[in-house]
Image (tube, rainbow, N blue to C red):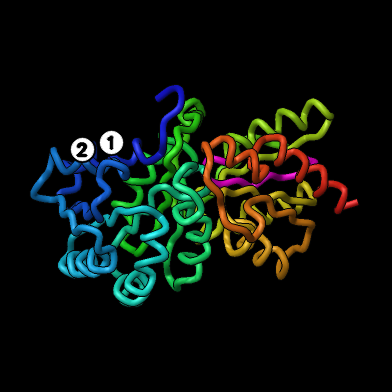
Amino acid sequence: MAGKVATRNAYGEALVELAEKYPELMVLEADLSGATKTSSFAKAYPERFFDCGIAECNMTGIAAGMAAAGLKPFTNTFAMFATGRAYEQVRNSIAYPGLNVKVIGSHGGVSVGEDGATHQCIEDFALMRDIPGMTVLCPCDGFEMKQAVEALLNYDHPAYMRLGRAATEVFTDEIPGYQFEIGKGKCLREGSDVTIIAVGLMVYRAMKAAELLEQEGISARVINMATIKPLDEEIVLKAAKETGCIVTTEEHSVVGGLGAAVCEFLSGTYPVPVVRHGVNDEFGRSGKAEEVLKYYGLTAEGIAEKAKKAIELKK
């Protein structure tokens, strides 16, 4: 899987590839199958595909009923609707009874681009993190996404997973033996001066930031935190002790997401400087994906600047 692939595309392919192995898999859609890439599953397994129309709350309730009957439903819509419009149903109908439903939010973050602020969901991690017992995932590329889909099929608990609209670099398939695990971060690059903890499309940019920092004589560790909740506290604590400062980077508000999770853990365990990099408590805006990302500083250069700030804070 070389080049660039949108994680939503990899997700749609994974559903079809895994359908025979997991006959309990059911796919529910809210009239967006072309965008969320569930349309291939609909064609291959029409008897296991349910288009619920523009009725996300009802879709969530139907999925809860399916899970109660022993099936493995995946609900699909844009992240803004999955976590915003249907929040009450996700909380009360899925998470409260602990039902095995996977809530899939496509088109997360500002890289949705031209759809603008109303559809650029930068609050989904925070909303889902706050629900008791809810697991929160955001794989970094197409290869990891496919592994995450199968991991979720073998994980009998409520979970939320974000997909991206924009095509992003696929690179984890080039890491020997790379395997996604729910609740585990992955150290992709060793370093001693600062740790960059990244999620989603910011992981590849974090790797590029580490290369920029290396040119300045700065050794940066890079961790892919594809599971935001439960946070891999062991890998975070090790990084804090060994590098002395941390930068978190995410295509999400700095409020309530990965950065907040890391700060909450370290503040009461092993306080070190943590610089949060993301969208600074403001809404998105319309524009081409890369232009919007650059506007908010969600670039390798932006991460590198935050890393140097974190190093200064630990002196």
Q: Residue furthest top?
A: 2
- The answer to whether 80 appears left or right of 123 in the picture is left
Q: Which residue is mark 1?
A: 13
Q: In this picture, which residue range is highlighted in magenta?
A: 192-202
Residue 193 in the image: x percent, y percent? Answer: 80, 41
Q: Earlier in the sequence, mark 2 or mark 1?
A: 1
The amino acid type of the residue labelled 2 equals Ser
Does dot 1 land on a helix, a strand or a loop? Answer: helix
Q: Which mark is residue 89?
A: none
Compared to residue 307, the image places residue 88 above or below, namely below
Residue at 41%, 30% (x, y): give it: 5
Q: Nearer the viewer, residue 114 or 29?
A: 114
Residue 228 in the image: x percent, y percent? Answer: 52, 56
Residue 44 in the image: x percent, y percent? Answer: 13, 38
Q: Which mark is residue 40?
A: 2
The amino acid type of the residue labelled 1 equals Glu
Asked if the residue at tag 1 contacts the one at tag 2, i.e. Cβ–Cβ closer than 8 Å, the answer is: yes
